[in-house]
Image (spheres, helix red, strand yellow):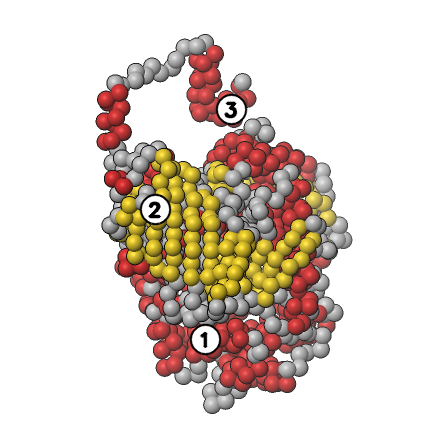
Amino acid sequence: MNLRFRKYGRAGAVVLTLLAAACQRQPLFQTIAPPAESRVAAATAVPDPPVTTGVSETLAVARKQNISGVAYNLNLTIPARKAEPIEVSESVSFHLRDNQHPVQLDFKAPTANLHSLIINGQPVAIDHRNEHLVLPAAALKLGHNVAEISLTAGEQSLNRNEEYLYTLLVPDRARTVVPVFDQPNLKATFTLALTVPLGWQAMANAPVRDSARDGATKQYTFATSDSISTYLFSFAAGKFSRLNRVLNGRAMSFLHRETDPAKLQSSLGPIFQLHADALSFMEQYTGLPYPFQKFDFVSIPDFQYGGMEHVGAIDYKAATLFLDEGATQDQVLARSNLVSHETAHMWFGDLVTMQWFNDVWMKEVFANFMADKITQVAVKNSNYDLKFVIDHYPAAYGIDRTAGANPIRQPLANLQDAGSLYGNIIYHKAPVMMRQLERLMGPEAFQQGLREYLRKYAHGNATWPDLINLLDARTPADLQAWNQVWVNQPGRPVFSHELKTRAGKITSLSLTQRAEDGSDRLWPQLFELLLVYPDGRTKELTVNMTERTAALPQAVGEPAPSFILFNSTGLGYGVFPVAPQLPARLAALKNPVARAAAYVNLYENMLNGEVIKPLALLNLYRQALTQEPEELNLKLLTGQASAIFWQFLSPAQRLAVGPALEQDLWTALQKNPSANAKKLLFKTYQSVALTKPAQVRLYQIWQAQKAPAGVKLTEDDYTALALALAVRDYPAPAQPILPEQLTRIKNADRRLRLQFLMPALAPDAATRDAFFASLKDEKNREKEAWVTAALGYLHHPLRQATSSNYLPASLDLLQEIQLTGDIFFPYSWLQATLGAYQSPAAAATVRTFLAAHPDYNPQLRAKLLQAADDLFRAEKLVP
């Protein structure tokens, strides 16, 4: 009992007191039931939730208490022409516990879209205000109710193209299409019928029950879906090719628009196999069979995300699925991770869903956590630990080091702000946290806790505290205290160490951590350090950091090392010390994970102005280009080298070091025996090319479509090369390269993308000005992936003399972009806009904007501070 008191503190004492009182049959609190009249009066006195924009937490709580048994029946007629409206017949049935109050259906579209409303068989006047269709209490009854609505579908989240459309309704976008109860804990069934042009294919959450041709149209009638949250409702329809296969006894259907025979031949087999392998792993790990009626997926050109876990109908970005023979190891691993991530969501997120979007990170962390495990098994020769470091640490640190850092779990008052919760903290810091938790508990206890969680809350909703309570019962560790700093607060620790030696032996070694933000927090964690000796020998020690300072008694008596590499297995989290001897001994580290940790440690210290300056680190990486044998590490260091070159060197330094960097990259490309590594080096060469000889070489490769020896370039690669040359005005403004590249592209979707990008790369500023001005119109931002790519070229360092003029207007658009765009678009907009700037003038523009908006949306303010962090650091680092 004392152990539990120590673990649970005051809350545990209260629980135990309650239990003791129950055992003695002595009530702690005596309550007297009020008269029946008072109970009725109290019930009727409860105020109605206000009708406000978005979906407030207040409204969501009230509806959850009163509404159950929700079912939607939807019939949509989709015309062949994109400009024509989509007419909908909708029926919403639900059960009410209390009919004394109006019921709000969420509908964020013009009132004119609503044509008629019938409730329980009686016509009712339409009351649509502040994004809600209000059903009057007088028309409702206790128990079963049915609202029949005739309307024109809202267009915001239908993603209509000339030859296809698809829904993307996370987090609160279902309400932009039809009236719904758009909150995750009011799960519902969907019965869908789609009338589409003849020749179109269709896919939805449930299997096709029937299809029938009627003149120039075809109607698909789908079976009733499983009970799902509204954000998981989905359909796609259009001119797709359909493929059906059966693997491991499971039928799978795949819709796609890919036309490249080489990509089809090399990708289709792995795509299906990856899904089959992921399903098998998840069933084995969770102990639960696949929980839904079917398992299909669709590939969409320029999809907003890598993928979206719609029940039974996963959506993917086409470019992530379809790879060719020239794909790098990183691309292959990324595809495996993506497929595994979305498949894992069928259990974590779809089967068990968060109660409210403040816990959206839960489904994402488990999807990433499982994806890492699946890829370790599914992809031969993959280094799980190395991939974990490279995938998660730079991305997590990129947010957690900033003044806009957010905790993993964040409060959320209104669902309309849920998109701002997404980001690299939930996708990348949370898996680090979860791996620490697994290590703390032990893999078996952790797995059993997750199995219990899935069984207990299957087809329902749960919170993070629900899961923590289940896990806490399986370990003597104090998970509540651990959870407080890892999950509920932002930031990271900074480590220092003290090493004492005598007569060539270690007499003491200790580590101390402090919070980067100056607070007194402590991050309990386990990680390793490596004692490195002159002859290449190493000794690895484990640190259990449960206090402010941790001594390592196991180090006492060991020979004094040349230096210490901290976080050598890449499992710890924070800013670790870097020994002055490390740069010279980097190539001597035999373990690729240790080298990856060293690259990360060096970069983080460089950003903090410690140990090494940007130019010195770039020169170190230039040496490593020919010495790093591991492809994933090469990706890491070339990415860091490119970032240093453009963001943390002055223009004069770039001109001085550029020729040597180009030569080093080209030499490394020629020497490296790996085709994948050669391609990484070529892409980096393309990124940094500043000199005339480098640009001539790239132009000749593009013109002849003859890649360097050992490098495989595809149509997409040649398009990227043409874009890189265009932003450099090569060969000359009078000889634009992009129109010719456009004629070489065979795929219609990829042609449209390049046509969109071309004005952003025009040699004359007037055309670029007009392009940026066009982005102020929401209709011109529909293809968000195209927009962020265009912004990257528009704000390229070589264009910033004119593009800096767009910064104030770009910041002014941010709030509108949050309301009209998808969840990742606000940060992507900011990152593509600010990410390449380093000038004090650009930093001043951001600070002026923040000062002029003291009451700015806190989540958007945080996103802006995150995106501007490198810009602010450049003020101190760039000479």
- Which residue was labeled with disc 1? 756
Q: Residue at x 51, y 82 (%)?
A: 738
Q: Amino acid at mark 1?
A: Phe
Q: Going from the N terminus, do you reach mark 2 or mark 1 first?
A: 2
Q: Position of residue 675 (x, y in %)?
A: 71, 70
Say which quadrant the N terminus sits in: top right
- Which residue was labeled with disc 3? 6
Q: Quadrant of residue 784?
A: bottom left
Residues marked 3 and 1 touching at CB (< 8 Å): no
Q: Position of residue 537 (x, y in %)?
A: 75, 50
- Which residue was labeled with disc 2? 147
Q: Residue at x 68, y 60 (%)?
A: 270
SS at circle 3: helix
Q: Is residue 60 above or below residue 719?
A: above
SS at circle 1: helix
Q: Amino acid at mark 3?
A: Arg
Instruction: Give the mark toward the camera: 2 or 1.
Output: 2
Q: Relative to residue 406, is residue 131 drawn left or right?
A: left
SS at circle 2: strand
Q: CA distance from mark 3 to mark 1?
A: 62 Å
Q: CA distance from mark 3 to mark 2?
A: 54 Å
Q: Residues within 10 Å of mark 1 (few under 14, many from 20)?
A: some
Q: Is residue 654 above or below residue 390?
A: below
